[in-house]
Image (cartoon, grey):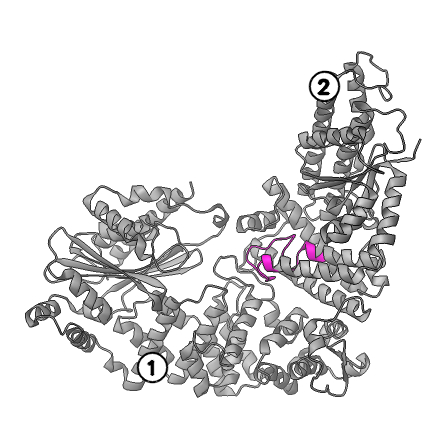
Amino acid sequence: MPALVSDRGTAPAPAEALTDAPILPPDAIVQPDALAARIEAGIADLRGAPGDSCRDAAPDGAELRREVRALAVAELAAARRAGTDALRAAFAERPLAARELVRGQTLLTDALVITAFDVARRHLHPLPNPTEGERLTLIAVGGYGRAEMAPHSDVDLLFITPWKVTGWAESVIESTLYILWDLKLKVGHATRTVSDCIRLGRDDITIRTALLEHRCLAGEAALAEELKTRLWDELFVGTEREFIEAKLAERAQRHSRQGGQRYVLEPNVKEGKGGLRDLQTLYWIAKYIHRVEAAAELVALGMFTADEYASFRGAETFLWGVRCHLHLIAGRASDQLTFDMQVEVAERMGYADHGGRRAVEHFMQDYFRHATRVGELTRIFLTALEAAHVKQAPALMRLFKRRRRVRPGYVERQGRLAVVDADSFLADPLNLLRIFEEALRTGLLLHPDAMRLIAASLPRFDSGLRDSAEANRLFLGLLLKHGNPERALRRMNELGVLGAFIPEFGRIVAMMQFNVYHHYTVDEHTIQCVSVLAQLERGELTESLPIATRILEEGVNRRVIYTALLLHDIGKGGTEDHSIAGARIVRRLAPRLGLNAEESETAEWLVRYHLLMSDMAQKRDLSDPRTVRDFAKAVKTRKRLDLLTVLTVCDIRGVGPGTWNNWKAMLLRKLYGATAEALETGLEDINRDKRESEAKRALRTALSDWPRAELRAETARHYGPYWQGLPTDTHVVFAGLLRGLGNGEIRMDLHPDDDRDATRACFALSDHPGIFSRLAGALALVGANVVDARTYTSRDGFATAVFWIQDADGSPYEAERLPRLRKTIERTFAGEVVAGTALEARDKLKRRERPFRIPTSITFDNEGSDLYTLIEVDTRDRPGLLYDLTRTLAASNIQIASAVIATFGLQAVDTFYVKDMFGLKLHARARQEALERKLRAAIAEGAERAAR
């Protein structure tokens, strides 16, 4: 009889998997022999002959076969539940023992699969004397073949037959699969001959990769050995370059699908950049070329150092731990590290809040550090392949052969910058910075050998080197001299040089900010900001950022702006306001970097107030003269205004894709222009009377065809704030809407405002108490997000309200939706629709957004405006928030003149310019406290409703 392998029990795993003991003793997970014995005893009972073996006899008929299968499924399901529960409990006790869990999970899966195959072959379809063509082998492939099973990983199986599938083999395979499916396992399967495997693997890289990691579970040993021999002799050998290029192209496509960034907010732990699949790709390539059975063998081959392999193993263990926890939390295969999952995984892995940061932020910082290290290992590995001429050098490297000659001590190797002699290089520690300057000067990337040398030499960045004037001159030169500082900064950061040279920067490396506003880690955000500044200097953003480009063309102190931008977030991660902490760090660092006293003071001021312009533009009413006066007093000089404007633009652009838009651009342009004029002509030139006169004069010009009596009536019917708060084109619209407007009539005008990425919605109607709130509720009901609003009452009893609105995607609200908006508003004012009730279905928090902690803050400011009290509400955003706030204010007899709405991811900052019912500011502290309690109650009630 042909030799069999692993009739029962657990199949052998690859060498590296075997080095990891399972998280529990094997018998505590599953006992294959006892499981098989229970099934055999049960089958004997079914056959009516207790104790007799039924190894060589078939069940009598289909009914008995169904009973046998049901018995097997019941026993296997019980074994799976017991094993899974044991593994889950052990992992809860040892939440970092990922490799051990994966090994245990493989043991359990092997026992289930092999036993199911055994039942099908020996009990459901026994064949006492199989022919040569009725041989069958069961092979594990892919991740299962690699013996790496997360709790809900797919079970990929390959059934090998010598020739065409016989009826017996088909029956065994079908019964095996039905048993496994009844166990709720997700099984991928194929039935092929060895020749089929060779032919299909030749045409399909995915199939070839799966076959590379095959593992025989049970059946004919000879067939398994034939498959292994022929795969290497007929498929793998001689096709190394083809396989490598295909896997790297597949990797590039995978990264592109996952966003192309290592620092995405919700990374995919398996498929994302720096994830498990990247490590597996390295192993596949190594195995394909060198027939290694374990990644540890890459050290002996010279592709990794021992430290690099330790990083490989550490990253792999961490990522597997994250993936296993994700599977257990979700109760299914789940590899996306969503916001809600991040919090729970961090808790399970033992992270805790400390140092002013949440546990999840510490966890994600470790995640991104591992992902970055995976990228470094990938570069090292691929360059080693190029050195062995197995992988082609990048096309651009081959295309552009002519380069600037490298300086003495350096050599170009494989199109990359390397050092001639390591000892000579390290004799002068300044070379650890000079090499980055040489890379920028020549346009060469660093050779992995040079990167290894630098990474191993980080302890040489002592206080003597950090305080060296020449070292700081070299560092500042990297920012200022070559036009692409982001390239040097990113490589220095990945190698740990930035954190070694500026230890305060090391704290923010891979630091994640747990919110949906910031797309990148703090260090990557900083490098993105520097990249935007360099693009501005190169003139690449003239069309989208004309003012910032012009400022740079006219000239600013580059040493100051680059230093301030590089260090603007360096104070993050502590309990203190990061602007204050950062300014204190800059006060110490700027002189060290070579800035003189005046430059250092300016850089410190920029870091201290780097959020000032953004906050003023997005959270204050720019039509109020007091806003511009206060901002001008803060910046004091045109030089500081120019520097702060450039820094603010770069900071917002560096947050992430889609953060910068025409609305923010318009606000910053308006604030910059008004402040520049105020600094030039004097602050006293900013006054309400002047703005009112200019606005009326502009309206008369625009409506020159109106009868003089009507025009005189229009300019006389509005109070001063109306003229000061709106542009002329909006005054023209309201003049038309108010012309002949009757009591009880509502007129509206929707017009796309492309300059603001919003739609301007103007409403004219008879004045009513709570008009602002009713309009806000109606707009929320039709899915319109308010980004800015003004409301005014005319002398003759009409309300003029204007809202700038966007849709859910942050785009202008479509004019085609006007009929529905009009009808909703009419029904709201007629009392047919109660916005608060109607909004309940829409006002919900998404599950993935619930873990975010956004505390509520409410402040009252009587100094920010000459006429109004400013109420700033900072809390979690949701669809019904503005309606709840404005309804509460209206119920408290508070008149809303304007509202400035700013959103930062899930955080909303709504600023209301208000008066009391007598037209006075809210000075009384008791009145403010009472109103704050009501607003907090409305927020809490709405949040509770949204969380249901």
Q: Can you tell which quarter of the image residue 33 is in?
A: top right
Q: Nearer the viewer, residue 249 or 715?
A: 249
Q: Specify the quadrant that holds the N terminus.
A: top right
Does the stretch in magenta take in 275?
A: yes
- Point out residue 617 in the picture as x, y percentages from the top left corner: 36, 69
User: Which element carries disc 2, helix, strand or loop?
Assistant: helix
Extreme residue toward the top, this view: 48
Q: What is the three-letter code of the residue carrying label 1?
A: Ala
Does the stretch in magenta take in 178?
A: no
Q: Nearer the viewer, residue 30 or 798?
A: 798
Q: Is residue 892 above or below residue 181?
A: below
In magenta, the rendered stretch is 256-279
Q: Is residue 750 above or below residue 827?
A: below
Q: Residue at x 50, y 82 (%)?
A: 560
Q: Residue at x 38, y 84 (%)?
A: 638
Sequence-wise, the earlier of marks 2 and 1 is 2
Q: Nearer the viewer, residue 641 or 6?
A: 6
Q: What is the three-letter code of the residue carrying label 2?
A: Glu
Extreme residue toward the front, this view: 164
Judge from the rendering whether residue 516 lies leftward or rightward of residue 136; answer left or right. left
Residue 838 showing in the rendered view: yes
- CA separation, marks 2 and 1? 87 Å
Question: On the image, numbered disc 2 is attached to which residue?
Answer: 67
- Point out residue 925 in the picture as x, y percentages from the top left corner: 27, 58
Question: On the image, numbered disc 1 is attached to which residue?
Answer: 676
- Point out residue 58 in the picture as x, y percentages from the top left corner: 82, 19
- Point out residue 813 in the picture as x, y percentages from the top left corner: 34, 57
Q: Is residue 70 above or below residue 485?
A: above
Density class for disc 2 (Cα within 10 Å; few <14, some 14-19, many ≥20) is: some
Q: Specify the quadrant that holds the C terminus.
A: top left
Q: Residue at x 77, y 58 (%)?
A: 285
